[in-house]
């Protein structure tokens, strides 16, 4: 963030929680439902995800998020693993649980939520999470309780085999139009895919990157607003400034309940404060208990 003070017009600090990559999973046994890319995804669930994504912790973790006292949560997609109805039912119950705990929920889809062309065509994500999707779809702008605008932008599409993201030029133009209409002050942007392909925290292989990321980066970097761009997808923590555009910071939050082989940490989420000094990011990590630490931008 630039050293200049942000224009927040004396408002109280905005506070929100960022949760990424829940990856609720269920195994599919019906062979008809495995006649597509889901065969690979199901194999991955069997070999890996059922150990890595410990979804039995979901309710306790939702309690931990609510215990911060913060009442806004942004979820940046990958609610499911292979976009089945069973997985979306688990995801919806979790999101509704956040809402029942008093959290205002904002969300965007991840690539695993449109894992097959069939799930995208039948709009399964929209069907299950309708109550939390803006009426006008994506991109959309909402205003958080203390006045900070939040843009929700679309970055996913079904693929045959890759995990590439996509944002269309007209969607970038629409996002810019929404930013231009924001009141003075900082702007939050939430999406599933990061814009930067490589930071201190991750290095995305080409088949996992966002198509048109450079166009989006240029647009955000040239819009003249202080921006914090929040994303998931890489399952790693990263908080960095754009080396070319000093008005943009990028945060990626690890998968919410992921246990990585050889690591004691079993889950994470981010807490974000916005005041006239800029954006402040706190990382919450769960090992035997939740630890909260202020992070420095790198
Ligand atoms: Fe993911
Ligand atoms: Fe993803």
Image: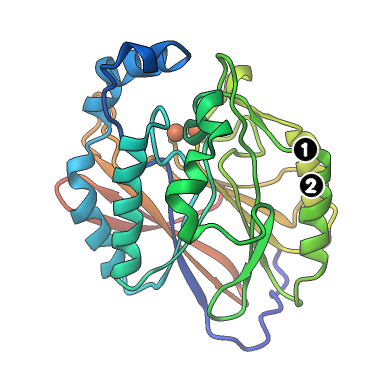
Q: Is residue 173 above or below residue 102?
A: above
Q: Is 272 on the left or on the right of 190, as rendered?
A: left
For this view, does 189 lie left or right of residue 113?
Answer: right
Q: Residue at x 49, y 27 (%)?
A: 115
Please report the residue visible at 80 percent of the width from the left and 70 percent of the height from the top.
181
Residue drawn at point x = 34 percent, y = 18 percent: 42
- Residue 282 lies, in percent from the top left, at 42, 59
Residue 238 visible? The answer is no
Q: Quadrant of the N terminus?
A: bottom right
Residue marked by disc 1: 168
Q: Which numbered tag is attached to residue 272?
A: none
Q: Position of residue 43 (x, y in %)?
A: 32, 13
Colour mapping used in the image: rainbow
Residue at disc 2, secondary structure: helix
* Residue 150 location, quadrant: bottom right
Disc 2 under 8 Å from ligand 2? The reply is no
Q: In the displayed structure, does residue 91 sit left or right of residue 187?
A: left
Looking at the picture, does residue 288 appear above or below residue 195? Answer: below
Residue at the disc numbered 2:
172
Q: Decide: marks 2, 1 in contact (CB < 8 A)?
A: yes
């Amino acid at each position: 963030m630039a050293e200049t003070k942000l224009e927040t017009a004396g408002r109280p600090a905005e506070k929100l929680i960022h949760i990424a990559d829940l990856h609720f999973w269920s195994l599919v046994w019906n062979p008809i439902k495995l006649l597509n890319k889901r065969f690979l995804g199901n194999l991955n669930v069997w070999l890996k995800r059922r150990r890595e994504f410990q979804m039995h912790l979901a309710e306790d973790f939702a309690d931990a998020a609510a215990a911060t006292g913060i009442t806004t949560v942004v979820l940046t997609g990958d609610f499911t693993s292979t976009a089945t109805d069973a997985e979306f039912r688990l995801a919806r119950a979790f999101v509704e649980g956040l809402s029942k705990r008093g959290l205002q929920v904002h969300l965007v889809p991840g690539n695993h939520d449109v894992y097959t062309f069939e799930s995208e065509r039948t709009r399964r994500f929209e069907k299950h999470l309708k109550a939390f999707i803006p009426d006008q779809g994506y991109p959309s702008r909402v205003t958080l309780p203390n006045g900070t605008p939040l843009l929700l932008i679309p970055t996913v599409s079904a693929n045959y085999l890759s995990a590439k993201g996509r944002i269309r030029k007209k969607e970038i133009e629409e996002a810019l139009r929404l930013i231009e209409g924001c009141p003075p002050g900082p702007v939050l942007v939430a999406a599933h895919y990061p814009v930067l392909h490589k930071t201190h925290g991750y290095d995305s292989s080409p088949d996992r990157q966002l198509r048109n990321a450079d166009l989006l980066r240029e647009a955000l970097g040239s819009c003249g607003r202080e921006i914090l761009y929040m994303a998931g997808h890489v399952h790693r923590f990263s908080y960095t400034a754009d080396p070319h555009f000093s008005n943009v910071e990028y945060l990626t939050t690890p998968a919410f309940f992921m246990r990585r082989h050889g690591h004691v940490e079993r889950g994470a989420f981010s807490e974000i404060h916005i005041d006239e000094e800029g954006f402040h990011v706190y990382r919450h990590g769960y090992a035997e208990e939740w630890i909260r630490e202020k992070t420095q931008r790198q």
